[in-house]
C-alpha cells in the first residue's frame, strides 16, 4: 500500500513539474516576443507605414509624402511632404534634395548628414503617399480616375485596375495619350480585342507617369 501511495505522489509531482515547465516556457517566449517588438525601430507619429520592397526603385517626386524615421530620435521622426522644388526640411539638417532619388539613396544622404549630430544614426525613408507619379484612365470604364504608378503597369493592367469596360465601350479604339520630351502629345493606339488574342502585343505598352488611357 505504501508503494502505491509513493507512486501516486511521484506521478503528481511529475505532472506538476511538466505543467510548471510549460507555463515558464510560454512566459519566456512571450517576454522574448515583447522584447523583440520593443527593440524594433518604431515609426512614432508615422507608425502605420512599413517598408515595401516593391518601392525600392521608386523615384521620389514633388508632392510625395515621406515617412522618415530616425531610430531613438523622436524629434527627427516625422512625415514630410516633398515641396514643388523637390526639397524637404528636417531639424538639424535643414533642407535637402529628395526629388529624383530613391528612398534608399535619400536614407544614405540623411545618415551621412546626421552623423555630425547623432551617434551611428539609423534612418528609414518610406514613401507614405504617392502623388508625383500617376496615370489616368478615362471614358467607358467602371472606375475612371487617377491611379498611382508604383510598379510597372501595362495598358491591360490599368484597364483591370479601372474595373474593366462599361457597356458599349469601343474596345478596338482605345488609345494612350503620352507627353513627349518636346512638350507635345503622342497618341498610342491600343486594340483590346487584338491584344488579348495575342496579336500585336507591342500595343500593350508599359505606362509612364502622367499617361492617360482613353476608352471611347
Image (cartoon, grey):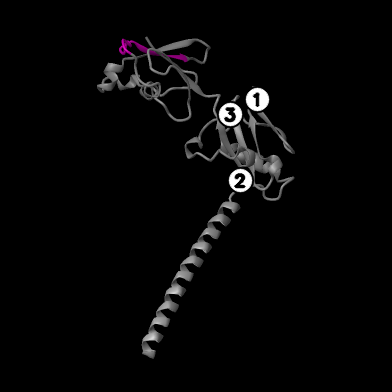
Q: Does 26 appear in magenta?
A: no
**Label 1 Cα neighbours within 10 Å, binned few <14 / some 14-19 / many ≥20:** some
SS state under label 1:
loop
Quarter that holds the C terminus: top left
Figure quadrant of residue 73: top right
In the displayed structure, 12 sits above or below 4; it is above
Residue 30: x and y in percent read 52, 58
- Residue 109 at least partly seen: no
Q: Is residue 62 left or right of residue 194?
A: right
Toward the left, the furthest residue is 197
Residue 133: x and y in percent read 52, 24
Which stretch did the figure color magenta?
167-178
SS state under label 3:
loop
Residue visible at 45% across and 74% down? Answer: 16
Residue 42: mark in rendering: 2
Residue 75: x and y in percent read 71, 41
> How far, Cα to Cα, is label 3 from label 1?
12 Å
Is label 3 or label 2 in front?
Answer: 2
> How far, Cα to Cα, is label 1 from label 2?
25 Å
**Residue tagged by mark 1?**
83
Q: Are marks 3 and 1 in contact (CB under 8 Å)?
A: no
Q: Is residue 113 left or right of residue 158?
A: right
Is label 3 or label 1 in front?
Answer: 1
Residue 213: mark in rendering: none
Q: Are marks 3 and 2 in contact (CB under 8 Å)?
A: no
Residue 100: mark in rendering: 3
The mark that comes first in sequence, 3 or 1, is 1
Amino acid at each position: 500500500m505504501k508503494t502505491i501511495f509513493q507512486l501516486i505522489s511521484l506521478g503528481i509531482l511529475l505532472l506538476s513539474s511538466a505543467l510548471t515547465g510549460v507555463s515558464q516556457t510560454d512566459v519566456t517566449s512571450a517576454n522574448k516576443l515583447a522584447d523583440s517588438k520593443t527593440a524594433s525601430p518604431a515609426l512614432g507619429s508615422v507608425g502605420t507605414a512599413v517598408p515595401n520592397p516593391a518601392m525600392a526603385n521608386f523615384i521620389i517626386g514633388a508632392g510625395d509624402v515621406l515617412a522618415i524615421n530616425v531610430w531613438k530620435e523622436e524629434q527627427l521622426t516625422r512625415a514630410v511632404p516633398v515641396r514643388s522644388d523637390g526639397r524637404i526640411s528636417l531639424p538639424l539638417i535643414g533642407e535637402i534634395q529628395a526629388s529624383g532619388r530613391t528612398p534608399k539613396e535619400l536614407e544614405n544622404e540623411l545618415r551621412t548628414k546626421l552623423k555630425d549630430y547623432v551617434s551611428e544614426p539609423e534612418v528609414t525613408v518610406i514613401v507614405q503617399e504617392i502623388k508625383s507619379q500617376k496615370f489616368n484612365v478615362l471614358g467607358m470604364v467602371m472606375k475612371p480616375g487617377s491611379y498611382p504608378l508604383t510598379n510597372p503597369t501595362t495598358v491591360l493592367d490599368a484597364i483591370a485596375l479601372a474595373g474593366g469596360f462599361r457597356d458599349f465601350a469601343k474596345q478596338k479604339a482605345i488609345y494612350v495619350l503620352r507627353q513627349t520630351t518636346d512638350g507635345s502629345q503622342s497618341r498610342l493606339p491600343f486594340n483590346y480585342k487584338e491584344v488579348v488574342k495575342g496579336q500585336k502585343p507591342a500595343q500593350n505598352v508599359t505606362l509612364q507617369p502622367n499617361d492617360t488611357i482613353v476608352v471611347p
